[in-house]
């Protein structure tokens, strides 16, 4: 059940309309990124930055979804995702 919820959140964040829902909220997003949870997530992502850039360049959505699912399965990732989800309402 939790894994399915993570997959739903990953799909929602990767969806085309996510950018539209977050437009104009750059300040709020920056606050999240600079929060304690945001810094921990940035650190996790930076460890795998080269592989993620390659996945984006190659269109490897499986790698991107896997990385996002890994992040969302952490306490910090789940809190950050909830805050982003709330912003998209």
Image: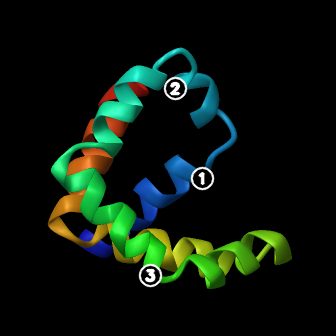
- Spatial CA distance of label 3 from label 1 is 21 Å
* Label 3 Cα neighbours within 10 Å, binned few <14 / some 14-19 / many ≥20: few
Residue 62 sits in which quadrant?
bottom right
x%, y% of residue 4? Answer: 36, 69
Q: Quadrant of the C terminus?
A: top left
Mark before the other along the chain sequence, 2 or 1? 1
Q: How far apart in space, not on screen, are marks 3 and 2 (Cα)?
A: 26 Å
Nearest to the observer: residue 77 or residue 39 = 39
Q: Residue beneath label 3, please? A: 47
Instruction: Please state the horizontal and vertical placement of residue 33, each as a whole percent of the image.
Output: 34, 44
Frontmost of labels 2 and 1 is 2
Q: Quadrant of the N terminus?
A: bottom left
Q: Which residue carries the number 1 mark?
A: 14
Count of residue discs = 3
Q: Are marks 2 and 1 in contact (CB under 8 Å)?
A: no
Q: Image quarter for residue 82?
A: top left
**Mark 2 highlights which residue?**
22
Work out how far the residue at label 2 is from the one at label 1, CA to CA, in angstroms: 12 Å
Q: Earlier in the sequence, mark 3 or mark 2?
A: 2
The front one of 79 and 8 is 79
Upstream in the sequence, badge 3 or badge 1? 1
Q: Please state which of the two labelled residues, at mark 3 or mark 1, is closer to the viewer.
A: 3
């Amino acid at each position: 059940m939790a894994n399915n919820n993570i997959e739903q959140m990953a799909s929602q964040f990767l969806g085309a309309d996510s950018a539209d829902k977050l437009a104009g909220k750059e300040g709020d997003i920056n606050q999240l990124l600079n929060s304690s949870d945001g810094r921990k997530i940035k650190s996790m992502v930076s460890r795998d930055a080269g592989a993620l850039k390659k996945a984006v360049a190659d269109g490897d959505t499986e790698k991107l979804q896997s990385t996002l699912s890994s992040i969302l399965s952490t306490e910090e990732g789940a809190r950050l995702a909830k805050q982003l989800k709330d912003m998209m309402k």
